[in-house]
Image (cartoon, rainbow, N blue to C red):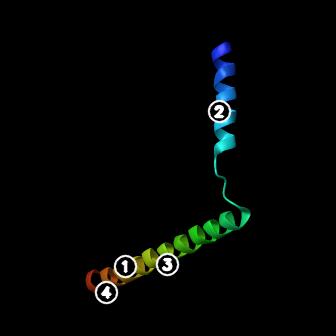
Amino acid sequence: MNKVITFLLEAKVELSRVNWPTRKQITMYTLLVIAISLAVAFFLGSLDFLFSSLVTRFLIK
């Protein structure tokens, strides 16, 4: 049981040393992730549309 208590105390000390991001940083990183996800989704959707149009045009006449 001593090892568990020691571990929890050391974990608490380590968490107090962490440099946590500010609310502004969290907001900016979240918006960045959403923007990149939308850009990748648009790009992959465009490729899917292009390739499906090509397959339809050349294979299904």
Badge 4 marks a residue whose secondary structure is: helix
- Badge 4 or badge 1: first in the primary sequence: 1
Disc 3 from disc 2: Cα separation: 42 Å
Q: Position of residue 54 (x, y in %)?
A: 31, 84
Eyeballing the image, is 57 above or below 15?
below
Q: Position of residue 22 (x, y in %)?
A: 70, 61
Disc 1 from disc 3: Cα separation: 15 Å
Kind of residue sitting beneath label 3:
Phe
Query: Between 44 and 26, which is closer to the camera in this rendering?
Result: 26
Disc marking residue 42: 3
Query: Between 2 and 27, which is closer to the camera in this rendering?
Result: 2
Badge 2 marks a residue whose secondary structure is: helix
Q: Residue furthest left?
A: 58
- Badge 1 or badge 3: first in the primary sequence: 3
Badge 1 marks a residue whose secondary structure is: helix
Report the residue marked by disc 1. Answer: 52
Report the residue marked by disc 2. Answer: 11
Q: Residue at x 31, y 80 (%)?
A: 55
Disc 4 from disc 1: Cα separation: 8 Å
Report the residue marked by disc 4. Answer: 57
